[in-house]
Image (cartoon, rainbow, N blue to C red):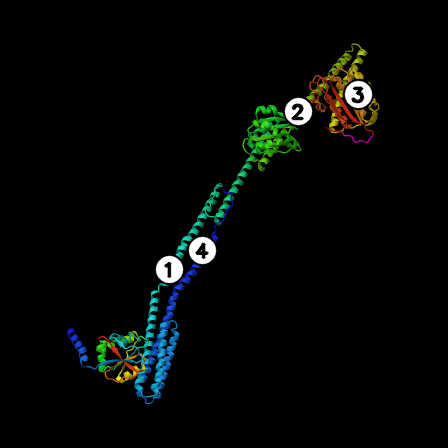
Amino acid sequence: MKDTPFEVKTSITRKLKAAMIAIAFFFLVFAIGIFLSSLGNFSGIQEIHSANAVSNLILRAIDGIETSNQNLSAIQSYKNLSDAQFSFIESQKLVRAAVIRAINISEENKVVKELLTRGLESIELYEESSKNIFTSTKKMGSELIVTKQYIMDSQEYLRKAHIAVQQSSDNTFKALYDNRYWPFVVAIFLSVIFFLFVVTFGFSISNKISHSIKNLSLAANKVTEGDFTYQAPIYEHDELGSLTYTFNKMVSSIHVGRSELNSTLDRIRKLQGITERFSEALTADQVMEVSLNESFDAAKADSGVFAILKKGKDIVEIQRSVGIPESILREWGSFPLSFKGPLSEVIRYHKPMFFQSPDEFLGTYPALNVILDKMDVEALAFLPLIIGSECIGAISFNFRHYHPFNQADQDFFMAIANQCAQALHRSQLFDETREAVAVRDEFLSIASHELKTPLTPLKLQLQLLSRQITKGEKEVPHAKLLKMMNNFDLQLNRLSKLIEDLLDVSRITTGRLSLNLERFNLAEMIYDVMAQYGHQLKQAIIKVHISSEKDIVGMFDRMRLEQVLINLLVNAAKYAPGKPIHMSLEKNNDMAIIRVKDQGPGIDPDDQERIFKRFERVKGSENIGGLGLGLYISSQIIKAHNGIIRVESEVGKGASFIIEIPIVENQYVERNVSSA
Amino acid sequence: MKVLMKIVILLNLMMPAAWAQKIIFIINSSNSVSRVTPDQIQDFYFKRNRTWPDGKPVRFFDRNDESELRKVFLSSILKKTSRQVDQFWIGQKLFTGDSAPTKVQRDSLVVNLVSRFPGGIGYISEGTKLGDGVKVLEISGP
């Protein structure tokens, strides 16, 4: 298909118009030709007619002259000369009239006219001379002869004129006769020319039109049969050529439209395939595997990576890759989100990036030529994996050959990326759910074990006591009984504490944890706690440091804060038995800060956030009893006071729990109680 | 037969010369011509030449058929018989419109007519009285 616009150089309409005009012109020429060829004949007929008239007039004049002549010859027989003269004059009138008329008619024949004029002169002469005859009879003889001389002259002239007229008439007729076929010859000649014109010009036009129409019809048939690649040849640059050109363009655009439709359908099918495969993939690993295989296949990419943004760490990690050299992966396996590179920027800005050439890529990221040099790529696409308002990672597609990245391509790649993101998100939720279920299962086993632990000795001792009573051997010693009772109390307290914790969790979960605020001094509360529970902790040293501002008075829930404090102390005692615990209270800009620092094994930074969640315990604490609810409940209580609880710790260097709560004087303060 | 005819014609031609009158041609005295050949006379008579050298129209006056002089004229100048001449003029009248010259009866009338027409020419018998208006035209050659 030529891109140059079609140029109409000729026109069938114009040709047909020209043919029409030519035909009209032909008829005009035909008519003029016939007319001109007949014109000679018409004038010839006219000439013959006038010659005939002249001839008749001359004959009449000759007759008249003869009569006059005879009249003169017989003049002696007349008794009265005046009678003879009258007769002569009357006859002469006719002669004159005829000759003058003949002269007028034969205006064009000069010879005839000349002869007739001379004849008229002679007539005048003999008329003049005849007067002598009629007046005197003396010299009659000679006068008569003289007059007759003139009569003879006039007769000669008129006869000669008559002969000339006849001659001319004969010649005219001969010419007429000779030319009688001229109009036919002209008509036949023009007809032949017209015939040739029709045969050449008309046939040529009709052939060309028929050829073009057949050509177009053939093309239409081909297209009907489904051949959209057929381009009809253009024979003439006329209206039909223009029609053919438009037809070709139309077929081409249909062809392009069909291939675009097919490609779109293909892509939709591929997306469906990806969706199906994703529905089978449950874990993040499976999803990434499927993403890589299916999306690379669908995008027809030659190489690429699948990168994930590590939560809370601002680190991008390449999880999977195809066709990327090992050396690059080793060096660039993970990098900070703030790094100036396409993957990190795509994640940061939530926008895809497309590079049609390595030069374009290096124009944006000149420092990354070290990576590009090791790879055989021509075009690159980087796509964010977006879930809602969050970006969880990115994928890249690299192409070894030029790729235009038109709008359809970009949309398709984004659709793939969205599919991957959805699937990955789903898998992450799945993993989290599974993990949560596992945590709960573990909690249940711990909880049942913990609940059972105090019950077993309780049951044993009760059985023992029961046996002793039923046997009635002897009275159970009082001291022993008291010890047993203390033990029962201890175990029941433990159970009660466990059940209370579970109830607190339930309250928090259902949003029923309410604070009973009262105004008191935090320092006092700390001393009270130390006084009440210090002995229970069996701790060698508990150092308490209260800052100079002794009175930190505010509106707090005393019971709950004591619960938090005890919890922290118990934990410290539990994880660092026999080691000193430091406790401090200080005030900082309307914030009360309580620190509880132990010298235990410390908490891994990875766990520092986790330990405040439900059913979570520090790793490696399997040998230490507890439901793992203490810190969760504590954090929720502090949260309800609009404060925060956090931990500062290094492995092997102990842990320091810090509580920061605002000191509130006003009773009417909105309290947030989270259900989480 | 032919031979006999030739002898008769020869005799006819010879005889007038022997006994007939002498023939004299006259023209108008205003005419500058004074001598012509018999052939020229023939041309004038048969209207082959209709004008004199000075442009005047030739008017030939013939004589009556019975006239002896005409016989001399026919035999010596025209070298034709009367019938031949009549035949000629019938033809001329039809095909050229020319008429035969007017025939005049008497010598005196010939003289009169020649004197009246400037281009006039006629023949008369020897001894006829000539007026002022005419003069004799010499015939040269045979």
Residue A362 falls within the magenta-colored stretch: no
Task: Please tell me how crowded label 1 is: few (under 14), some (14-19), or many (20+) other residues with Cα within 10 Å.
Answer: few
Task: Give the image location of residue A271, x and y in percent.
Answer: 58, 33
Chain letter for the residue marked with disc 4 in the picture:
A
User: In terms of secondary structure, where does tag 3 sit?
Assistant: strand
Q: Which residue is mark 3?
A: A584
**What is the C-alpha distance between the residues marked 4 and 3?**
117 Å
**What is the C-alpha distance between the residues marked 1 and 2?**
111 Å
Q: Amino acid at mark 4?
A: Ala
User: In terms of secondary structure, where does tag 2 sit?
Assistant: helix
**What is the C-alpha distance between the residues marked 1 and 4?**
20 Å
Answer with mark 1 or mark 3, whichever residue precedes in sequence: 1
Query: Do tags 4 and 2 sit on the same chain?
Result: yes
Q: Nearer the viewer, residue B34 or A295?
A: B34
Q: Residue at x 47, y 55 (%)?
A: A17
The image's mark for residue A188 is: 1
Task: Please tell me how crowded label 4 is: few (under 14), some (14-19), or many (20+) other residues with Cα within 10 Å.
Answer: some
Q: Does residue A145 show up? A: yes
Dominant secondary-structure state across the stretch colored magenta: loop
User: In terms of secondary structure, where does tag 4 sit?
Assistant: helix
Where is A397 relative to B126, above or below?
Answer: above
Q: Nearer the viewer, residue B110 or A398?
A: B110
Q: Amino acid at mark 2?
A: Glu
Q: Amino acid at mark 1?
A: Ile
Quadrant in the rendering for residue A108? bottom left
The image's mark for residue A435 is: 2
The stretch in magenta equals: A666-673
User: In terms of secondary structure, where does tag 1 sit?
Assistant: helix
**What is the C-alpha distance between the residues marked 1 and 3?**
137 Å
Mark nearest the camera among 4 and 2 is 4
Q: Which residue is mark 4?
A: A19
